[in-house]
Image (cartoon, rainbow, N blue to C red):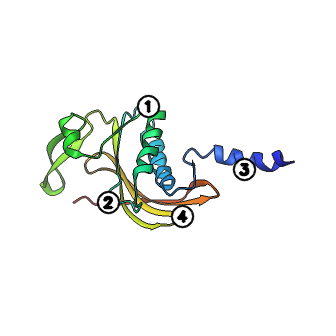
């Protein structure tokens, strides 16, 4: 009898590749990271940089550890969020570019488009069971996308309940 009840529920959660098990708030952010990696750069992704400077967590150590473990399982190298180091080590190439209305700007990019940067830019809400945040992702300066996410915890599973595209005007 219990199998008939729990089998459909378990199947539902197994179909959600972004679902994250665990009660801690860091798992809400990890759910967003997993969704971005899965959706945007699933094939050929070698490198990931995650900027956690704007998240509302009081301590990001658990989140950093969780992201590292996720990357290790997928064969992705998690790089430090240090622009100068990324340039010095050759992960980023920098160049001058001409943008809209002939405005010159400094560009950075992963040379082979084999990495992405995820930037949590604004947390509207963080509670024990809900995260509302904006996250941008790109492989090159001024090229990429942004979404707002509402992530909720049901029991011990974090799920994305709402996602919307953010239109960005870089100039």
Q: Quadrant of the C terminus?
A: bottom left
Q: Quadrant of residue 65?
A: top left
Lower sequence index among marks 4 and 1: 1
Residue 104 is situated, as x and y percent measured from the top left of the image, at 12, 52
Q: Along the horizontal axis of the image, is 29 left or right of 23?
A: left
Write down the residue under mark 4.
128
Name which residue lies at 71% across and 46% down: 10
Crowding near the residue tagged with mark 4, few <14, some 14–19, many ≥20 C-alpha atoms within 10 Å = few
Disc 4/disc 3 C-alpha distance (Å): 23 Å
Crowding near the residue tagged with mark 2, few <14, some 14–19, many ≥20 C-alpha atoms within 10 Å = few
Dots 4 and 1: beta carbons under 8 Å?
A: no
Foreground residue among 95 and 132 = 132
| SS for callout 3 | helix
Disc 3/disc 1 C-alpha distance (Å): 30 Å
In the image, residue 31 above or below residue 152: above
Q: Along the horizontal axis of the image, is 171 left or right of 27?
A: left
Residue 92 is situated, as x and y percent measured from the top left of the image, at 23, 39
Write down the residue under mark 1.
75
Lower sequence index among marks 3 and 1: 3
Disc 2/disc 3 C-alpha distance (Å): 38 Å
Lower sequence index among marks 4 and 3: 3
| SS for callout 4 | loop
Write down the residue under mark 3.
9
Disc 4/disc 2 C-alpha distance (Å): 30 Å
Mark 1 or mark 2, which is nearer to you? 1
Write down the residue under mark 2.
168
């Amino acid at each position: 009898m219990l199998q008939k009840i729990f089998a459909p529920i378990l199947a539902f959660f197994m179909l959600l590749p972004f679902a994250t098990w665990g009660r801690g708030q860091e798992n809400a952010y990890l759910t967003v990271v997993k969704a971005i990696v899965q959706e945007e750069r699933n094939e050929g992704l070698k490198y990931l940089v995650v900027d956690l400077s704007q998240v509302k967590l009081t301590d990001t150590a658990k989140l950093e550890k969780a992201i590292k473990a996720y990357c290790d399982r997928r064969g992705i190298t998690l790089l430090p969020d240090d622009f100068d180091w990324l340039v010095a080590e050759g992960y980023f190439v920098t160049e001058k570019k001409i943008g809209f209305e002939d405005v010159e700007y400094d560009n950075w990019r992963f040379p082979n488009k084999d990495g992405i940067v995820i930037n949590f830019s604004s947390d509207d809400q963080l509670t024990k069971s809900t995260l509302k945040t904006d996250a941008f992702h790109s492989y090159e300066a001024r090229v990429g996308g942004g979404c707002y996410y509402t992530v909720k915890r049901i029991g011990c599973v974090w799920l994305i309940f709402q996602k919307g595209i953010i239109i960005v005007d870089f100039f």
